[in-house]
Amino acid sequence: MIKSEKLNKVNSIKEEFLNNNGLFFTDHSNIKSDQSVVIRDKLYEVDATLMILKNTLASIAASESFKDLDLSNVFKGPTSVIVSHKDLIATAKVLKDIIKEYDLLKIKAGIIDGKLVSANEINMLANLPSREILISQVVCAIAGPLSMLVNVLNNLPQKLVMTLSAIQKEKAN
């Protein structure tokens, strides 16, 4: 590659590194071209992209994009980058499914909100329930104590009426 082409490539990688919801760095040692097409199609469904890059260009772009992070260990061996453009958790779930189904990629690390995260943390993200389930769990957690409070408050007048009724019956006898 000519130096200007390399500079343009580094700038485009840097732009991808800076404009996303999260990055996942994977080892793609076993991947073949037809398999990468299948992976790209699955990632496209959750608005994510697979970038297979040269380590030298990617490490230059990463060092310019993430000055506070040491990514030297990440760019050893064949490294691809999965860029999540929208839903980070959905991308992590698809990545987990791809690894489970095809056993082609191995998670090395990731960058979420400008922080370097390990493969274990990415797996924990992938195991989170969906957004809808989390919202329903929060609603249930809020509604549970409120409904118990309503029941307690409803029982107070009922108990008062029952006590007064018992006192009235006692006095009548």
Image (tube, helix red, strand yellow):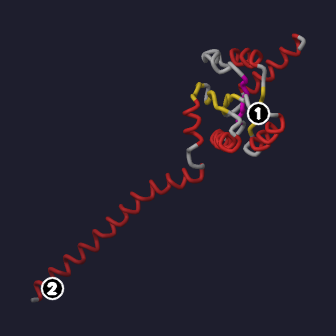
Inspect the image, locate mark 2, and give the three-letter code of the amino acid beneath it: Lys
Distance in Å between CA atoms under marks 1 and 2: 85 Å
Q: Is residue 143 magenta?
A: no
Q: Which residue is mark 2?
A: 169
Q: Which residue is mark 1?
A: 31
| Side (left or right) of 21 relative to 136 | right
For the N terminus, give its image quadrant: top right
Question: Residue at the spot x=47%, y=57% of the render?
Answer: 140
Residue 107 placement (x, y as % from top left): 64, 31
| Side (left or right) of 19 relative to 145 | right
Q: Nearer the viewer, residue 16 or 72?
A: 72
Which quadrant of the figure has residue 7? top right
Compared to 28, does 72 lie above or below? above
Residue 60 placement (x, y as % from top left): 73, 14
Q: Nearer the viewer, residue 86 or 74?
A: 74
**Mark in the foreground, 1 or 2:** 1
For the C terminus, give its image quadrant: bottom left
- Magenta highlight range: 78-84
Q: Which mark is residue 146?
A: none
Residue 57 placement (x, y as % from top left): 77, 17
Question: Residue at the spot x=88%, y=12% of the render?
Answer: 4
Which quadrant of the figure has residue 49? top right
- Earlier-in-chain disc, 1 versus 2: 1
Element type at mark 1: loop
Q: Is residue 83 magenta?
A: yes
Which quadrant of the figure has residue 42? top right
Inspect the image, locate mark 1, and give the three-letter code of the amino acid beneath it: Ile
Compared to 103, does 51 lie above or below? above
Q: Residues within 10 Å of mark 1 (few under 14, many from 20)?
A: some
Residue 108 placement (x, y as % from top left): 63, 27
